[in-house]
Image (cartoon, rainbow, N blue to C red):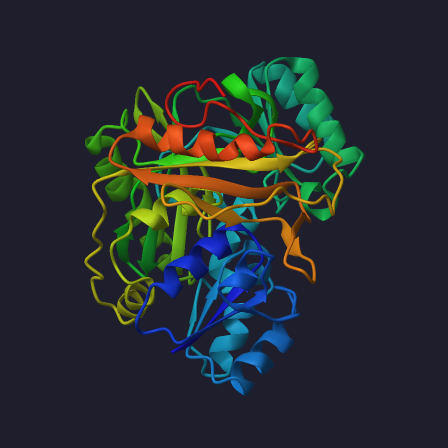
Amino acid sequence: MNVLVIGSGGREHSIVKKLAQSEQVSEIYAAPGNGGIAAEATCININDNQVEELVAFAKRNLIDWTIVGPEVPLLAGVVNAFKAEGLQVFGPTKEAALIEGSKDFAKSIMKKYSIPTADYQTFTDIEEAKQYINQKGAPIVIKADGLAAGKGVVVATNLNEALEAVEMMLVDNKFGEAGSQVVIEEFLDGKEFSLMAFVNGEKVYPLLPARDHKRAFDNDQGPNTGGMGAFSPVPDLNQKDVDYAVEHILKPTAKGMIEEGRSFTGILYAGLIETDQGPKVIEFNARLGDPETQVVLPLLKNDLIQVISDVTAGLDPGLEWEDAYCIGTVVASEGYPGLYKKEVMLPELSPSDDSFVIHAGTGQDQVGNYYSTGGRVLLVGSVQKESQEAQKHIYNYLKVFDSNDSFFYRSDIGFSKVNK
């Protein structure tokens, strides 16, 4: 088969790596891809939101399957456009992807179908929002309604932070149209985890749970980021909580989307938190999570393209998993998630038997050297029987970055702090 992967980040590199293991896949293309993806697929100069050009490329190159990585093309209707041309594509339509595109829509679905989540209200008026915050007190959570690249959420520990957050979104327009409406939620205390599932209509096939680290610095300090690392499975998570989440969150959501005329096919991602009343939803995404994908897919025994074919055909893919741990630590550009330099040369990334490298924000020059193009540059991961062994291999590999102050990484991804 010829397969096209839409996107340019770490999630897409993980997908490409998994596809490359399939005997059914002969040619992999990525649009637009990145420096690391270029070593394993043919990168094409089409951005992920250029829907017409992507469709034309798929038809011209006889693409058998297209897999959509990021949320932006999903909400731009890339799946709708591919289906209209009779092309096989894996991902939700733009109508179904609204579960990620609008936090207010997602909360309304949860309220209507009794899916456990935090209490909330939605506002467009700054004074009403401030009045609600003063009434509820802190801690409290402020979310831009639309897509904000993982940065539109403020967990305010005091009233001033909360009031500044709504001012930033509704008045200063820091997130543009995405922040013209805000969702204000009660703060839920507990351990977070991510649970993704292959979904087709009412049929739900969960992946292994994962946990990512959102804060920029060690010991969960610093600003929220798109994720500084992740691990899977989650040893302190009870199986009954996973089962509860599947039965009371993922399945009712899939049914609810059918009821709403927005039947969902693709990957449904639930960002969850363990509370005294059981798991509750923090957010839904309409695609594989990043960086969770980078630590979940390496544990999947199945052929990914076969899983996608089975799920889309209404068949149980029979998911099987390695009995192992996978941990991944992100290397980021100094300054991320704020301002940072681009086009900084990376140290030499040697092949390793014990670790793997997933590229996110990288490019490659004419002689094959990698340079940075984004905030999250790459992820170093390892699959091992013992979590401590995986950690050891990762942090040993990461020493190549220790003398370069253009990059940073957390030294505590996994289950305990590591001495570098």
Vertical relation: 72 (above or below) 378? below
Quadrant in the picture for residue 212: top left
How far across and down, in percent of the image, does residue 246 sit?
A: 27, 43
Vertical relation: 117 (above or below) 294? above
Counting labels gives: 0
Camera-side residue of 266 and 178: 266
How far across and down, in percent of the image, does residue 138 sit?
A: 58, 14
Quadrant in the picture for residue 365: bottom right
How far across and down, in percent of the image, does residue 313 sit?
A: 27, 72
Does residue 320 appear left or right of residue 374 in this picture?
Answer: left
Is any part of residue 18 visible from this angle? yes
Is any part of residue 152 visible from this angle? no
How far across and down, in percent of the image, does residue 292 sit?
A: 43, 42
Q: Which residue appears farthest toward the right when viewing the image?
A: 172
Vertical relation: 242 (above or below) 220? below
Quadrant in the picture for residue 327: top left
Camera-side residue of 375 and 187: 375
Vertical relation: 266 (above or below) 87? above
Figure quadrant of the N terminus: bottom left
Residue at 76% x, 35% y: name it.
339
